Amino acid sequence: MALFLLFESASGYSLFHAYGLDEIGQNTEAVRNSVLDLTRFGKVVKLVAFHPFSSALDALNQCNAVSEGLMTDELRNFLEMNLPKVKDGKKAKFSLGVAEPKVGSQIFEVTKIPCQSNEFVLELLRGVRLHFDRFIKDLKPSDLEKAQLGLGHSYSRAKVKFNVNRVDNMVIQAIFLLDTLDKDINSFSMRVREWYSWHFPELVKIINDNYLYAKIAKSVENKSDLSEDHIPELADIVGDEDKAKEIVEAAKASMGQDLSPIDLINVQQFAQRVINLSEYRKNLYEYLVTKMNDIAPNLASLIGEVVGARLISHAGSLSNLAKCPSSTLQILGAEKALFRALKTRGNTPKYGLIFHSSFIGRASTKNKGRIARYLANKCSIASRIDCFSEVNTSIFGQKLREQVEERLDFYDKGVAPRKNVDVMKAAIESTLNNTSQEDADGLQKDETSVKKSKKKSKRENVDGEPMAKDKPLEVAADGDAPIEPQTEKRKKKKHKLEEQQQDEVPPKVNGHDTEQNGTPKKNKKKKSHEDLDNDGDVQMRSEGTKKKKKKVKAQGD
């Protein structure tokens, strides 16, 4: 059976025919030994066809399709044109060797071309890749390297494309930095306590908080300088006047030794560093909360921002966490205990990182494992919603949190919780209502903006074009007085309207109104007859006057 090789390079698709396999052998070791020698390998493999990519964008699309295990139309046309045709109902007398098994299965499903991908084919393709520039004419090694470099950059850039607001890598770095800051601040605060206790040992028992201790150590400086005038300043730092007075009284009767000014300056500087670190830790925590609300709002509202961030960082990414089953998520962070239990055949751990959640602490001892399993189930649902949902909402997380609360009540009091189907339906309805309200608000804003723009345009027209009332009066040719002032125009308009109303009043015929005699059509006909009679009377009068004039003329003659 003939063997063809499909090789996908950065410059295009190429098809090779492996025809001289008997010369090097059919096993992979023989091929591996002959790959380095071009004279031997050139007798085995022969170029059949080469289809270059039209552009860099085309190369990127083809590379993405191959990596996803898809066959494009270009690849299908290339294979159908250059491979031997298979008759209907008969088996192919050749096979196609491919590097990607997914592409091979796709090619076989669509074109019925038998494909194979094994170590033997991969070694042959390795030799083709090594001597590819020798098989194709007018292809320089530098051109091939440039194409590979450009395609590699574009492919990696396309794979790294993501939503900037939903970068889980920032959460992973922030939670790692938060943990290290906690350790550093704790160790530095202990160092400040030890250092300043040589000078003022009684302050340790009065102030327990590390941040406040560093602040007071910086503000007090030398204990011998403390007096009652410093009580308001100390009260502002501590937040309690009684503690401030206690500090002043303890400084008066302190057993600590005196320090030189240089030593006090060093203590102050180190205390300032601890204060700055603790303030930066607060800002970093606020940043982590905002990022978690953007990336995984449902997981954050269910289990908390810090625990959710630890789960994401331990899984590697939000997508990896979403792919984990709830049983794996339940023991994330307790891998050592799990494998130790499997090795010693002991009891496996019930919880890992989710132990830091408040739900497990609130549960009773016998129900901790049950609530941990239930909480892991809800966390897996929330992480999948956050990862694959396009709508950024925390409604599902709030509903899942309510379910966990109901489950706690069920374990403690026996109150039956709601079903998961009903809760999810309510969450979906609330999300749809929120989206519809947002759309309606957006439409209202658009309508108000359009109305405002129309009003502005009308005002501009009014300001730019004066109306007829504002037009100046027409002056007569002599320039003495205006022809028709506004009052006269209004009077004439009123007279015209009155005359039109009088004309519209129907005349009386035989002492009755026309409304009693018939319809408006009949009124029109009667009006027309009356007009004709009046016209006839006028014509007769004019003829009579003409005859009288003729008679007068004749008598005069």
Image (spheres, rainbow, N blue to C red):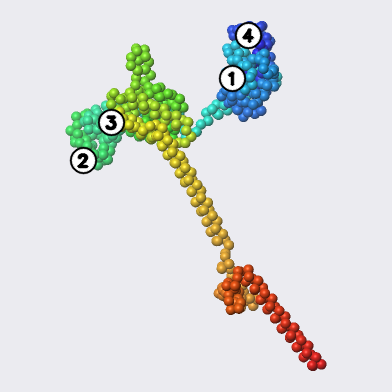
Of residues 340 and 33, which is closer to you in this image? 340
Residue matched to label 4: 34
In the rendered image, the residue lying farthest to the left is 253
Spatial CA distance of label 3 from label 2 is 56 Å
Which callout, 4 or 3, points to the residue nearer the camera? 3
Q: Residue at x 58, y 62 (%)?
A: 465
Of residues 172 and 540, which is closer to you in this image? 540
**From the image, which quarter does the N terminus lie in?**
top right
Residue matched to label 3: 413
Q: What kind of residue is marked 4?
A: Ser
Which callout, 4 or 1, points to the residue nearer the camera? 1
Residue matched to label 2: 228
Q: Earlier in the sequence, mark 3 or mark 2?
A: 2
Which callout, 1 or 2, points to the residue nearer the camera? 1
Spatial CA distance of label 4 from label 1 is 29 Å
Spatial CA distance of label 4 from label 3 is 77 Å
Q: Residue at x 27, y 32 (%)?
A: 209
Q: Residue at x 26, y 37 (%)?
A: 238
Query: Where, by quadrant of the figure, is residue 525 drawn?
Result: bottom right
